Image: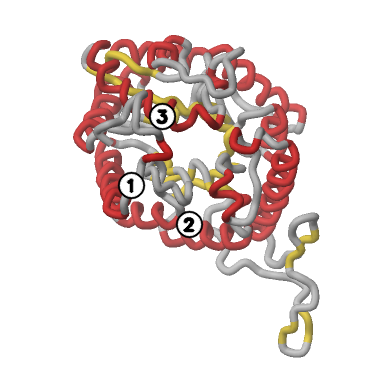
Amino acid sequence: MPDAGAGLPDPRDRRADNSDVVSAYRNLCHWAQVADGLGYDTMWLTEHHFQYEGYEVTPNLILLGVHLAGMTKLIRFGQMFNVVPQWHPLRLAEDFAMADILTGGRLEFGVGRGTVPRESQTLGTVVASGDNAMSREADRINRETFEESMEIIQMAWREESFSFAGKHFILPPPGIPDRGATVTSLTLVPRPLSKPIKIFQPVGSPATLEYVAKQGFIGVFAMAPYEVIKRSWDKFAEVSESYGRSLAPGAGRVLQLPVHVGRTTEEALRDARPGHDEFVKFLSPYGRFSRSFEGAPFDFRPSVEQSRSNGVMAIGSIEEVTDQIGRWIDLLDLDHLVLFPDLPGLTQEQMDEQLHLLATEVLPHFGFGSSAA
């Protein structure tokens, strides 16, 4: 994306053709191998559909994760996130179970409720978004569907046979004939070999924090200033404790941090600015950055300097990025950090440099050696 930046073209005017998408997959395969060689622990992917603009082009994270596991040695592959209401829960449970077997347990299971009406409504569900005035009814239906789906997925993985009756799903549907009888229960074939399956879910609201903590999932926190993340981080531990799950400092939670490192501050800002501004231009209509800056309007568009100043993104020299990650580690007793170095407009070579600089110049300061998530 050589024209990434704050100006034209408008995101709706972008049109990635299929060769661009194929190139993106080749890059992902390449970066999986680079990251594996550098000792990174996990490569996380994100699910999106119908995005002709070319920003997010991986509709099936489990399928891609199986492929990437076959061409690497040690690195794991996680979904950040499978958009659960857009799946039939049993198809998602089956696919992950089969992938867990085929990869020898090298996948991580992440789930989310979704953000984009173009995807959700086309695939048979709804979601609250800036595009529908954050409809409370859409959010209620989405949350109900998600929570029933997660109950079904875990039941199907855990139990030899199961049935479920809820508001949105009845499984098996009544009256299915089967060799002279009717079907009253189901058995998932296959079920995962890994037990239990850890479940990662983003935490973006008080209701979701309560749900994730109660379920014993791993909460993923991102894109907010130090003090906002700290409050939610500590609240997650308190709520978990109220449900009988005592968390060690930093445990049961993940921080996801966008990052761009340069040899100097000026180099980092110069190279990160176009991609940062393209992301802001693309995501601000969904209210993505209003949550990062308290009191900001819904469609707020921060500058790269603003994103850098309050900890939302780590952008700077090797020393500055090291200091910012260190501040997060000290603040949260951080145990699990997910770095997000990919920005629109970076070439394959620039992304290679980011992976190398982080693994060899930044992360060793924290005792990770050449290992990072």
How far from the left and from the top, in percent, is residue 137?
A: 75, 41
Q: Quadrant of the C terminus?
A: top left
Q: Is residue 360 above or below residue 60?
A: above
The image shows residue 8 at horizontal and vertical percentages of 34, 29
Mark 3, other Cα within 10 Å: few <14 / some 14–19 / many ≥20: many
Rendered location of residue 110, percent (x, y): 54, 44
- Tell me which corner region of the image, top left, top right, bottom left or bottom right, holds residue 238: top right
Q: Amino acid at mark 1?
A: Ala
Where is residue 246? Give x, y as percent.
68, 28
Q: Nearer the viewer, mark 1 or mark 3?
A: 1
* Disc 2 + disc 3, Cβ < 8 Å: no
On screen, residue 106 versus residue 177, left or right, reads: left
Which of pointers 2 and 3 lies earlier in the amino acid sequence? 2
Q: Tag 1, which secondary structure?
A: loop
Mark 2 and mark 1 lie on one chain; the one further toward the N terminus is 1
| Amino acid type assigned to the residue bearing label 2 in the image | Asp
Q: Amino acid at mark 3?
A: Phe
Q: Nearer the viewer, mark 2 or mark 1?
A: 1
Q: Determine the CA span between mark 1 and mark 3.
A: 16 Å
- Measure the C-alpha gap from mark 2 to mark 3: 33 Å
Q: Nearer the viewer, residue 254 or 74?
A: 254
Mark 1: give few (<14), some (14-19) or many (20+) Cα within 10 Å: some
Q: Residue at x 48, y 31 (%)?
A: 283
Residue 279 is marked as 3
Q: Residue at x 79, y 73 (%)?
A: 174
Coloring scheme used:
secondary structure
**Whether residue 52 is visible:** yes
The residue lying furthest to the bottom in this view is 180
Q: Is residue 308 above or below residue 349?
A: above
Q: Nearer the viewer, residue 296 or 187?
A: 296
Circle 1 residue: 16
Which residue is under mark 2?
A: 100
